[in-house]
Image (tube, helix red, strand yellow):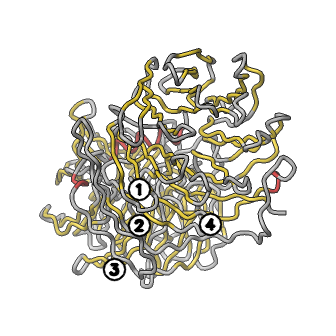
Amino acid sequence: MNHPSILARLTLLIALLFPACSALDQPYDPPKQFPTNTTLPTVETTAQPLSTPFVPTEPIVIPPTPTEIVFTPPATTEPVKINPFNAEKLREVARIGNGNINHLDISPDGRQVAVAASIGIYLYDAQTLSLQRFIPSEKWLGSLAYSPDGSRLAAWQADGVVKLWDQSTGQEMLSLGQFQNQEFTADGMSNLAFSPDGNTLYSGGLTGEVYIWDLSTGQLKKTLGGNDVSTTQIALSADGSLIANLKLFDRELRVWDTQSGSEAYVIPLDDFLAAGIAFAPTDNLLALCGATISGPFEFQGQLRLIDAHSGETTLVIDLPEGSGAQPTFSPDGKRLALGSGGNSIKVWDITNGQEVATLQAGYSPVPVVKFSKDGQILVSGSFDGNVKIWQTAEWTEIGTIGGFGRHIEDAALSPDGNLLATASLNGAVSLWDVESRAELVRWVNPVKWAESLAFSPNGVTLAAGFNDGQIKFWDVVTYEEIRAIQAHESHAQTLTFSSDGTWLASGGDNTIKMWDPLSGNLLRTLRGHEQDIENIALSPDDQLLASGAGGGEFDIRIWDTISGTELRRLEGSMINRLAVFSPSGAYLVTGSTGGTLGVWDTNTWSQISEFGSLGLGVETILFSPDEALLFFGGGDDVIMVWNFTARNQLTTLKGHTQDVNRLLLTPDGKTLISASSDGTVRFWQVIP
């Protein structure tokens, strides 16, 4: 799917050098709980040996940090079954997750920590770590900054709009800029800066600009640069006279005079791919983090200190674990902290280049860190969903704020509807109780992540396909790992059990494979695709399998599961990898990059209709059991509900701020569940 936010996320991921394998595989101590109120079972798992020796990476099973999910559900009566006559009354009634951590800041007085998440701003007491306020947002928030006096909060939205709120009341004060028909989402961006007097705000633009705003009038004063790729970082000098502008994949760093609006100078970066920048608070020294490029896919994480006037590099520090997205200086300018592409935070004395401290932040990369104004506190946000508070006198952890997540790649519902499984990009596979929405167990693998999930028909086994091609099986009663198989050379992006549970189909690399889940033995391999398989679906009688691949293969292929032969191809310039059979097996519905759905008669294999209007592509399709309703979602961040029989739209469900990747329906037909790249799972019911 050609989605600007996805492209931006992938390219910035490369730029940040978060390696797939690094020092992350070292032992990990579970995070301290502050305060502790929840305990999950601790499980050690081992994989059963296969005919071909295989050594699995042992997952870490950890308890969650205290979670304060901010959500006020509407008053509800007993839920009713969703049907074409009441679907327009579907409303969000519950949510799992506080979204993804994208940025954070500490108030100037050090009393408050603000977290910019994918669904809003969370304000916490820096001492007690209790939540003080939640400011919801309809858009993904990428950057955050307090005004110098702490009275206002500014946040940068993915569509380039900047909003200001009153910190004490949470009321919106200003909205700066205009919505642009594109979005840029990335973790750890720093696209906002207040002037020292708090009267001017600087923000990065989606096409390389730096905007200068007069906050007394809300008017744009100047625009610096532009007509290029998106600005990912800006940094203002301590006296406010210079502003540096870093753009995606740019090989030059531009520094502007804020008074005249003219380009002061350009610092060539040559083979250095910068991901983050920061001015030192005491002089015009610039810190750049990123990577040197020595060849195709050959990166070396690096931190550089550069004289902002001469462009001379004064210090170079290699980063074996890769680089985070934003360096931060201590207030006295003597120390610099940076999250790594591993799971740690490094602190250096920049007067001599010596490492002062290494802080173990969890099991995932740490894109953003921030010193308090007095230098006594360091705050970090990591992909494992935790915000950590550190005291800098002895570099010890004070506490952890949990409840955040990471892009949810997939979700699955147990056949009885009691358990929900989620797979996140941070390497976590979690099991939840649907009724209470409590997390029962979390399996964490710090060096890879699950891309697909499937429950066995008897509800006892959960299968997960990983980005390295491995499939793991867990017993959801004991939480023990049953088996691990190396199913594909790379990626196991899609899984589905047969209706009787005697075999499991997996799609990855360019093959479809059928497995005996009890023994782990390979039963059959289906070949024919040239690109990576991204979706498979079984007909209700298990006799047909539909498959779709990425990489420009604009067709859906239909296979006989008994003989393993390809029966036909459904072709079209707009067909993407997605297909699903109707519960009766009479229809196959395909998705498209253009956001429409195609309906195919499975007797004649002719397309009988086309409908829908998701402009950024379809990612997930779901039938109601009676085929009366069709739900679908994708890159437009919304869920469309259609009357399948009449082919007319009933309602659009809004709330997610990023791609909707999976839709599920409880067996009683009363609750729709959606999982999204915004790091949340949402529950929808009919509200009279």
Instruction: Please tell me which of labels 4 and 2 falls first in the chain.
Output: 2
Mark drawn on residue 435: 4
Q: Closer to the observer: label 3 or label 4?
A: 4
Circle 4: is it few (<14), some (14-19), or many (20+) Cα within 10 Å? few
Contact (CB < 8 A) between labels 1 and 3?
A: no
In the structure shown, which secondary structural element does the residue marked by tag 4 occupy?
Answer: loop
The residues bearing labels 4 and 2 have C-alpha atoms spaced at a distance of: 25 Å
The residues bearing labels 1 and 4 have C-alpha atoms spaced at a distance of: 21 Å
In the structure shown, which secondary structural element does the residue marked by tag 2 occupy?
Answer: loop
Q: Which residue is mark 1?
A: 428
The residues bearing labels 1 and 3 have C-alpha atoms spaced at a distance of: 24 Å
Q: Where is residue 267, by image quadrant?
A: top left
Residue visible at 30% across and 76% down? 397
Question: In the image, what residue type sits under mark 1?
Answer: Ala
Mark drawn on residue 636: none
Residue visible at 36% across and 51% down? 482
Q: Position of residue 558 (x, y in %)?
A: 58, 21
Camera-side residue of 214 and 60: 60
Q: Is 487 left or right of 585, judged from the image as shown?
A: left
Q: Closer to the observer: label 1 or label 3?
A: 1
Q: Position of residue 589 (x, y in %)?
A: 68, 30
